[in-house]
Image (spheres, rainbow, N blue to C red):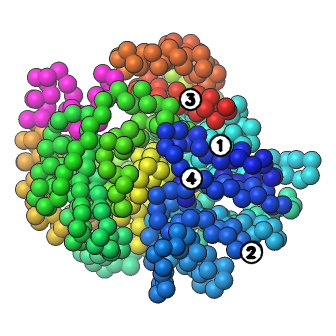
Amino acid sequence: MSDFLFSSVTKPKGHLTRLLSRIYQEEKRSRFEFHGAWGSLACVNNHYPGFDPYESKKHIFIITGGPIIKAPNPNIKKNQNNINTKLIYERWKKKNIIDWTADLSGPFAIICIDKTVPSIEIVTSMLSSIPVFFHTTPTQNGEEICFGTHVDTVASLTGLLDKPDYTSIADLIINRSIVYPYTPYEGISELPPASVSYKALQNSNDIKTTQYWIPHERNPFRNMYEAAVELRNAVVKEINDVCSDQDLSVGVLLSGGEDSRVILSALPEVDKKKATTFLHGENLEERIAHTVADRLDTEYVPVYQPEESYISQIEYRSALIGSQYEPVHGHAYGVHRKSSMTSTDVVLGGYSADALFKASSLPATFKFGGIKFGTLKKKRITKSDLITQAHERKFRKKIIDEVVERRKNHFNYIKTIREESAYEWYSIWPLRMRMSAGYFMTNRRLFRSYEPFMGSVPIQLASAIPSQWKINRKLFHRAMKPLLRQSRMIPHIDGHLPYFDNKTSLPVRLFIKLILASQAKLKGKTVDMHRAFPDWDALQYTGTMQAMVDFYREKTAHVIQNIFSHRDPKIVLSPDTLALHQILSIIQFSSNRLLFSQ
């Protein structure tokens, strides 16, 4: 399933599926509904095979996402549409031998209704990469509890679309994510990562939650080399497990970077493989990706769409991603129909390698040539880490103080788990706190997206390996160097050679960066012209953006007046006040509020 929505109060037939269908406005998806004395449950079918709902006499069991099933199953019948769902159900509910860190690998969320008790159980994956949101409403007969994987559908179902959490919206604008466990709506919260939550549906008892895994700091490796070998083997195994059938068609979302190049390099022999880059025109990123694909004997298909699609498609992207994330990261929306990704059996990417294995969230002692040297080992998080002086001028003091307080509380919680590496894990536990999380949310809903670096064993390795080994690509380079040999002389979009360590390729990197900067200056552009992303600054001044701002100016007034020091939407929604991604995040909330209230 792609998404589910549950209420402990029985709803009219079709109500929940209508809400879910608004997520996929232009995408036709089959839907399932279940009703009983226990309430109502709806889900949207997805493209991952074997994950249709399973219903027994006692339970309704749904798995959201398409995790790799690693549990032994000698009697698989491929023609059964819910074979994977049933397998996990039986290991959990019949045999009681489920191991959530070993039997499934990759993002998932599970909902299980016990129709006889009645009760509900929800399981989140190790990093809660598919979060589950919930809200409890007092009623005359007790309470109504709602669960869902899309925050705006939960808000619509519970009547909270008109009760924004202004602090969370400001947090998204300032820090490009909303701190766990908050959401853009008052009263809607998020279940913990790596957890099993239980709720009896006939009383007002609290949700009982246990966590089956916690990312403690426990390094079992004698040295970095041991860890590197383990990491390489784990990532290759994830790829082999999902590509075990040679008849599968396999796509790779290939950029000009090294993470997706590692994935393509590690692919086993398959009959049909293709690399794709989403672009806005011919540039250096395309040339590098094309060269890598040719070197690795892979068909290469660049797919183009106008830069202004980030604005003209804002309503569709916002609905698909949800108000929890920045809409500018929905890169695949629109171009997915121009590519063959929607009909490809497996689509692989390199998402989160930088966060999990390169400590990209850690600040540097200093930088030279775009390379981090050393790390600032922070034992606490301060207001200056979160809020700039510009933010303090633009936002109301009460809002600023609340954002800082929430983020400090989350950091202090992470510190109780990871004393030495709290700063690294504070933004990846759960993983949806990454500012680019909307990228994964878009992909998983549009095609059969698999991210090998987000597998269960790689995640456990990311937790075990010390942060210091990850700095400056030290661990990642040692782990992936053997896979990069064929493309060793093809540079990264940033200029370095991924096959070599940072220091060895530094002269090459500096030379390439100088050339790229000179080319950009001659054309009156930024260096970003060489990447797949649009020119964000230029987009702010287009007629399309101005029309969008004019349309939403009054509709966003309540958000602006409760968050910003200056209360005039015309001034706030201006390039002189906010960056494009910040303006679009404000528009996104209002767009989703209109859509899901219909």
Distance of mark 3 from mark 2, alpha carbons?
41 Å
Which residues are the magenta region? 515-539
Rendered position, 96 above or below 242? below
Rendered position, 96 above or below 25? below
Q: Residues within 10 Å of mark 1 (few under 14, many from 20)?
A: some
Q: Quadrant of the N terminus?
A: bottom right
Residue at x 84% of width, y 60% of height: 37
Q: Are marks 1 and 3 in contact (CB under 8 Å)?
A: no
Q: Which residue is mark 3?
A: 591
Q: Which numbered circle lies on residue 30?
A: 4
Distance of mark 4 from mark 3, alpha carbons?
25 Å
Q: Is 259 on the left or on the right of 546, as rendered?
A: left
Q: Name which quarter of the figure residue 38 lies in.
A: bottom right
Q: Which type of secondary structure does the marked residue at label 2 adopt?
A: loop
Q: Is 143 on the left or on the right of 268, as rendered?
A: right
Q: Amino acid at mark 1?
A: Arg
Q: Which residue is mark 2?
A: 57
Q: Quadrant of the C terminus?
A: top right
Mark closest to the chain's N terminus, 3 or 2: 2
Q: Nearer the viewer, mark 4 or mark 1?
A: 4
Q: Which residue is mark 1?
A: 18
Residue at x 17% of width, y 35% of height: 282
Q: Amino acid at mark 3?
A: Ser
Q: Amino acid at mark 2?
A: Lys
**How far across and how far down the image is residue 248, in percent?**
31, 67
